[in-house]
Image: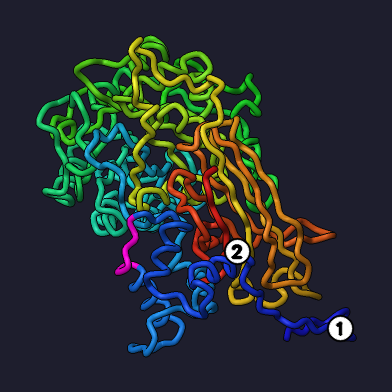
Amino acid sequence: MGTYRMFGCFTRKFKVIEAAPPPDVKAAFDKYADGGNQITAEQLRNFLVEVQGESGATVADAEEVVLQVLQKRHHMAKFRRHALTPDDFYQYLFSADLNRPIDTKVHHDMTAPLSHYFIFTGHNSYLTGNQLSSDCSDVPIIKALKRGVRVVELDLWPNSTKDDVHVLHGRTLTAPVELIKCLKSIKEHAFSASEYPVIITLEDHLTPKLQAKVAEMVTQTFGKMLFCPESECLKEFPSPEDLKYRIIISTKPPKEYLEAQTNKDKEKEKDSDDDVWGKEPAELTANQEDDKTDSDASENNQDDEDTDASEPEMNSSKAPGYKSLIAIHAGKPKGGLKKALKVEPDKVRRLSLSEQALEKATVSYGTDVVRFTQKNFLRIYPKGTRFNSSNYKPQIGWMHGAQMIAFNMQGYGRSLWQMHGMFRANGGCGYVKKPDFLMNVDANGQVFEPRAKLPVKKRLRVRVYMGDGWNLDFKKTHFDTYSPPDFYTRVGITGVPADETMKKTKIKEDNWKPVWDEEFIFPLTVPELALLRVEVHEYDMSEKDDFAGQTCLPVSELKQGIRTVPLYDRKGEKLNSSRLLMRFDFI
């Protein structure tokens, strides 16, 4: 019973009612129990195969599920029965631990070249907050690595006495952190969430003497973990499998810094958030910015990382020890974007573009971008005016095969939720194999055309049954001072423009355990790049609706059948108990 005080003078009492299992769950139990009051392991195996789509499930697998359910619910080591009651069966289906919506193991082919994968990538990985005045630290680097981020960016600058190297966001008020501290933290935490390689991208503003010092630091810190190619330029990148537990350095070779020119973005900041959890990502296109100030979106745009902001004399000589550590060469050839996207037969490299430059490139050179990314790396980074560390729409890059969509991991909101969703795929290892259509070349030498109108390939049917757990994760008055919450669920697709949509359930008033039992169907033209978006909100008549949890799931990895979908807070941390019971089918 929950008691809410109204206006300080009288109270309202609401009973917390346990929701009954949805009709689909009751029907499934009755069918597979053959009218009995228990489901045996053999009967459960039939349910797993026929309803849950687990074609390889065995009786032994089902027996293990039965054992786990009984141990979890009844806290006993030995049982007289080895079957599930209707309530056991329901609690199994509504368990985030036992009935997950996607696989938690690595299952993609990991033997292809690195360029065949989308890679979980951070931007200015050392920043604790905004881009102008926050502290620099190894703490956000550690946090990112523990989440599965595989590309870490460090900006290298001389310290005040020019005898050591600091990591900071140059020409801002950010407080520096020592490079050696960042390197040691990367070594310690690089493989805590994934065994696949960590790439360190360096934005280098150093003299040759300090570059030599960096080479010594890197070599001594990582030792045999460091991948150093035998030849100066790789003809093809090794595979994630080949590079397990290795550290890879990517930056511009020292000799090319002399030719680089500074081209800093001088746009004025425009806030990109319309509410506490951010704008809809579909609205976050660079075209909303004033073209007159879009100086870094031109064909000749230079990456902030690939641009040397130091004095020319600082790079008047080479640093061979430093250069030999660079496994992935960055840089942009002279002659504009068309030339920069040229695929060289005997050399692979990394090109970086701002989010605006990518948008303009895809309009004029869409298929060239796709072809380039079949062999080379393309890194996309946030525009310079995102001072508040907000993020942008990642789908444009993914549609064109860009492997490294660099995000501010402290820029919480819908765009980052989608990034988290993409990299829940493949066991959360930080590497997601690109769809075959992005890698294929047809008999006429043509590649995928991202702007082509495509037919519907499949339809995803989603049923939102119910939710539970908020009363355990939030205080009684968190959502409403005077009554239990009025929850509703938004569910939809983000992906290629033709597939994007959002729908929502009805509002369930005054209920901590809402039951919606509503169905939605989503036609998909490119299901391989689609993410299922789920958000729960609490309706507020007088103010903005309250946020109550979210998740994003890769559609290509969804397990069919009745599944429990755990929810996350706005920072992407998993809520302890809040979850939804849903059903997924492809029709």
Q: Quadrant of residue 445?
A: top left
- Specify which label sits upstream in the sequence, 2 or 1: 1
Residue at x 25% of width, y 42% of height: 110
Q: Amino acid at mark 1?
A: Gly
Residue at x 48% of width, y 67% of height: 96
In the rendered image, residue 432, in percent from the top left (x then y), is placed at: 36, 42
In the rendered image, residue 534, in percent from the top left (x then y), is placed at: 59, 53
Residue 59 in magenta? yes
Residue at x 29% of width, y 59% of height: 192
Q: Few, some or many C-alpha atoms within 10 Å of disc 2 (few <14, some 14-19, many ≥20)?
A: few
Q: Quadrant of the N terminus?
A: bottom right
Q: Is residue 245 above or below residue 25?
A: above
In the rendered image, residue 247, in percent from the top left (x then y), is placed at: 22, 45
Marking on residue 102 = none
Marking on residue 8 = 1
Q: Nearer the viewer, residue 587 or 330?
A: 587
Q: Nearer the viewer, residue 29 or 545?
A: 29
Q: Nearer the viewer, mark 2 or mark 1?
A: 2
Q: Is residue 285 visible?
A: yes
Left/right placement of residue 541 relative to residue 376 reads right
Left/right placement of residue 516 relative to residue 89 reads right
Residue 118 in magenta? no
In the rendered image, residue 82, in percent from the top left (x then y), is placed at: 38, 81
Q: Quadrant of the C terminus?
A: top right
Left/right placement of residue 407 relative to residue 57 reads right
Q: Amino acid at mark 2?
A: Asp
Circle 2 residue = 24
- Magenta stretch: give its range: 56-61
Q: CA distance from mark 2 to mark 1?
A: 44 Å
